[in-house]
Image: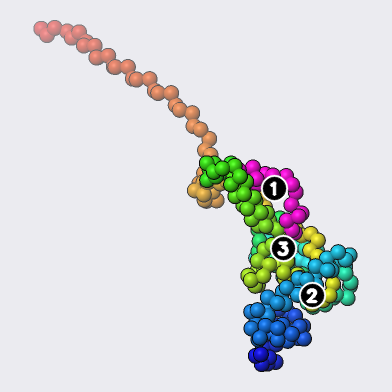
Amino acid sequence: MAEISAKLVKDLRDKTGAGMMDCKKALKENDGDIEKSIEWLRQKGIASATKKEGRVAAEGLVESYIHTGGRVGVLVEVNCETDFVARRDEFKTLVRDIAMQIAACPNVEYVRVSDIPAEVAAKEKSIEMGRDDIANKPAAMQEKIVEGRIQKRLKELSLVDQPFIKDQNISVEELIKQVVSKLGENIQVRRFSRFVLGEGIEKEETNFAEEVAAQAGLNKKEEPVAEAEPAAEPKAEAAPKKEKGKKKK
């Protein structure tokens, strides 16, 4: 068995957030292999978190996050079982990370796949069934391909199925379960809203050249000038009449 140093235990604890004794046990169970120990802890964390999912979680925090520049904002409610846990730094960090995750995922609309309305799934199926690349395949194969695509699409809409922005090796759901394992309480994301500056407002299309001209005052409409009627052509002057002169004597 590999020697389990204090540094190795600390490294595993930093990567997983698990307790010191849990990390030490995980390393012993996996001969000091830190990657296998991480997987072992995740499995244990998921097992303990699943047992707590049925318990009432009515405390927690409502967190806001405004992204740099003020163009994207998020409100999220995350629940736990007691006010004591809601005040823990680990819980506050989790809620903050979830708010940032929502801000970074413009396609996410629901907390979990089970929250997605049936009509949304039906619409996705209708779209996929009409794609040209499966038109010539047998019906059974079409159904199988479409089902796989729909599940993938629904997970793209689900917050807890997203890869965690700070660690792409775990999902948001796994992150929550790690914190559940550490704090010993049921933790649930209840709801969220994402705000994008100007979203839904129909913007007026403006011709750039015309806009510049307008700002420069060059496109003021001039009053139409009535065209002057063409002047009458001057009449030809009559040749001067010759005066009848007196005959010279």
Say whether marks 3 and 2 touch (CB < 8 Å).
Answer: no
Q: Is residue 155 above or below residue 82?
A: above
Left or right, 142 with reference to 86: left
For this rendering, which residue is in front, 104 or 157? 157
Residue 1 image point, x, y percent: 66, 90
Q: Residue at x 66, y 92 (%)?
A: 3
| Camera-nearest label, 3 or 2 | 2
Q: Main secondary structure of the magenta part?
A: helix
Residue beneath disc 3: 160
Q: Going from the N terminus, do you reach mark 1 or mark 3 first?
A: 1
Marks 3 and 1: in contact by CB < 8 Å? no
Q: Earlier in the sequence, mark 2 or mark 1?
A: 1
Q: Residue at x 86, y 64 (%)?
A: 54
Which labelled disc corresponds to residue 181? 2
| Residues in magenta, as a range | 110-129
Cα distance between the residues tagged 2 and 1: 33 Å
Q: Quadrant of the C terminus?
A: top left
Q: For mark 1, what is the residue? A: 121
Mark 1 to mark 3 CA distance (whole Å) = 18 Å
| Kind of residue indicated by mark 1 | Ala
Left or right, residue 229 beside residue 118:
left
Q: Quadrant of residue 16?
A: bottom right
SS for callout 3 = loop
